[in-house]
Structure formats: C-alpha cells, structure tokens
Amino acid sequence: MTTAKKTARTIGFTTVHAPSKEHPSVPYHVALLRDSDGKHHVRKTFKLPEIGQSFDLEGKGTVSHVGIAGTGVMAAGIALLCLENELNVVAKARSAAAAEKLASAVSKQLAKKMDDAQASSTAKRFSTTLAPSGLSGCQIVVEAVAEDLAIKQKLFSELDAVLPPNIVLASNTSSLSIKEIAANCRHKERVAGMHFFNPVSKMQLVEVVKTNETNDEAEKTISELAHQLGKTPITVKDSPGFIVNRLLMPFLNDAVRLVEEGVSEPATIDSAVKLGLNHPMGPLALVDLIGIDVFVEIMRELQRKTGDKSFAPRPLALKLLNEGKLGRKTGEGFYKY
C-alpha cells in the first residue's frame, strides 16, 4: 500500500554553474519531471538528481525537523539525505567522541557534494546531542543503532519517557519486530518502522512498518518524510523481514551455499547473477556490503520468528563471522578490500 501523495519522477536534468540575482549560489540542478498523467514539471534542487527519482509535487511537506538516534553508516546516510533536502537534523550520540565522528563524516560528505558556501550553510542545520531530551524539538526521530533488540528496546524506552507523545518514533531496523522494539513504551501508537536501504543516497524504497498499535498519524508522518527525501514509501505489516529482506536474505544464504558446495567462486556467482538476473550487485558482494555479522543476525531473527530451519545462516557465513571477516567494514569477507 502506498500513499496517494502526488509525485513525479525525474526524466532528465541539467546543472547550472553561472550565478544570477535569483540564484547566487551555484551549482544547482534543474530536474525535468513527468507525473503519472504524463504532465511535465520542473524542480530546482541543490542535490544532484537521479533519473527515476521521485519528487513531491505538493510543496516541501510538513516535516522540517528530524532527529536521528545513532552515529553509524546508516545514521550518517539518513542525516546527509535530510540535510540535502533542506531539513534540520539533530543526531543523538552515545558519547562525545561518537558525536564528533558523525559530525566530521557529515561535514566531509557535504564538502564533496556542494561548494564551500552551500556546505557551510547546510552544516548549520546539523547538530548533535548526548541526551534523549535533546531531540524534543523534532517531529520525528529515526533510530539507526545496532541491529540488537535489547539495545533498541532500551533506546525507545528512553525516548518514549522524555519526548512529547506527538513526536513519531521510527526504527530503521531491517528485520526486528517493531512491536517488540516498542514493548516498553507507553505511547506505542507513535512507534513504527522506517526501513531505509543501503546506500541511503541511492536506494529508492522505504518500508513503512506498521504494527496493530501504530496510529495513522505516525504512518502519515513517516510517509511524508520519505516523499520529502525523494523516496517511495510502501506500507507493510510488522512481520519477519518485512517484504524485501524476507525475500532477499534466503537468496543470499543460498549464494553462500553455492560457495560451500564448490559450485563456483564468489566472483563467478556474482557475475552470473548480475548478467542473468540483471541485479546491480552480486549476492556475495552484497553480503559483504551489508556486513556478515548483520546478515547472520537477520537470518537468525528470521529463523527465530518463523520457526523455519531453512532460514539458518550457512556454516561458511558463521565461519567468517567467527574469524572477524565481516565484509567491507573489516576489509575482508567473501572478497578482500
């Protein structure tokens, strides 16, 4: 199910480098859009558009202040995307060192994407806090911490205890039950899932995960934010793996099985999938990108929630996990980096 918001997709764009009285800050981009009725529209943006990217045709939207709980890769990606779309961002970190590291990462990415004046202006809309109460001025808080139920439950309990009940609390979990994450919250009606995909800047889909206690206002706010960020929200029931990971993870697990059985080398298996299924990335390279530790945890969660033994992570994945070869983040997994 998707929201009925009027959107259009990018079919072309140009970049303007010459400043004018109306647009002194350059470069900026002018996107040519086409809606579902075949009508054309033009939108100006400082963020480089991508062909097929969705734009909201109903204005900038109602979300202006976003909180992010977490400082890792996904948290940084979500923060950067929000900033590029002219939103204010406050990120909660667990330590001063983590906050400084995130701020530095965001600053470096802004410098790569914008000129000095734009990057400096955009960075002013980003701040960090160590206290949950520091997120009280936000309309929605997106959690992006470790894929660990106990950690998420503790965080959501802390946020729920100090933040006004009108602030939506959304989890970026890829597989954990939203209902279980919200188990210790008083205001369960404002808790839902907002599952971005990695890399945040490129992946179009956002899974909006709704429990039987999530109210319509929370779902609407999350979908609204997704549209503002140029993403396509799809609402899904709170179920093991939601839609994408329920289908994808067993596929990746079977790719690991092929390596175990000596059917072929990882590079050959990945090439076969890219050429034969038209996937942009092979399954084993994708496992390395996700992180073998995260992949194993998702498979275990799917097995736990469904009771289906076929979801058990393959022995080779467990071996790499035990050896600390977690993929790209450690420099070695199915490939060396």
Image: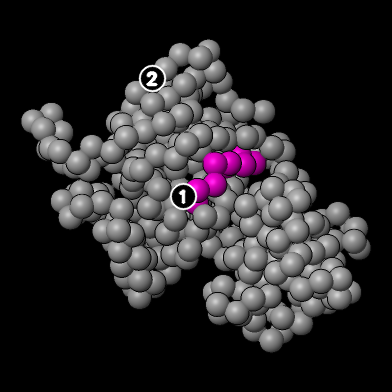
Can residue 169 be seen by looking at this rendering? yes
Residue 158 disc label: none
65 vs 116: above or below: above
Numbered circles on residues, count: 2
- As drawn, which residue projects farthest toward the left? 21
Residue 182 on image: x %, y %: 62, 51
Q: Which corner quadrant of the image does residue 216 belong to?
A: top right
Please say whether residue 208 is one of the residues in the magenta stretch: yes
Residue 24 on image: x %, y %: 12, 37
Q: Which corner quadrant of the image does residue 22 belong to?
A: top left
Please say whether residue 160 is one of the residues in the magenta stretch: no
Please give left or right for residue 191 compared with residue 213 in the image.
left
Residue at the disc numbered 2: 41
92 vs 259: above or below: above
Give whichever of 162, 138 is nearer the camera.
Answer: 138
Residue under the image location 46 percent in, 29 percent down: 11
5 vs 200: above or below: above
Please give left or right for residue 332 compared with residue 104 in the image.
right
Q: Count residues near mark 1 (Cα–Cα under 10 Å), then give few for <14, some for 14-19, many for 20+.
A: some
Residue at the disc numbered 1: 201
Q: Which residues are magenta?
A: 200-209
Colour mode of the rendering: one colour
Residue under the image location 55 percent in, 35 percent down: 232
Q: Amino acid at mark 1?
A: Ser
Residue 45 on image: x %, y %: 31, 36
What secondary structure is marked by label 1? loop
Q: Amino acid at mark 2?
A: His
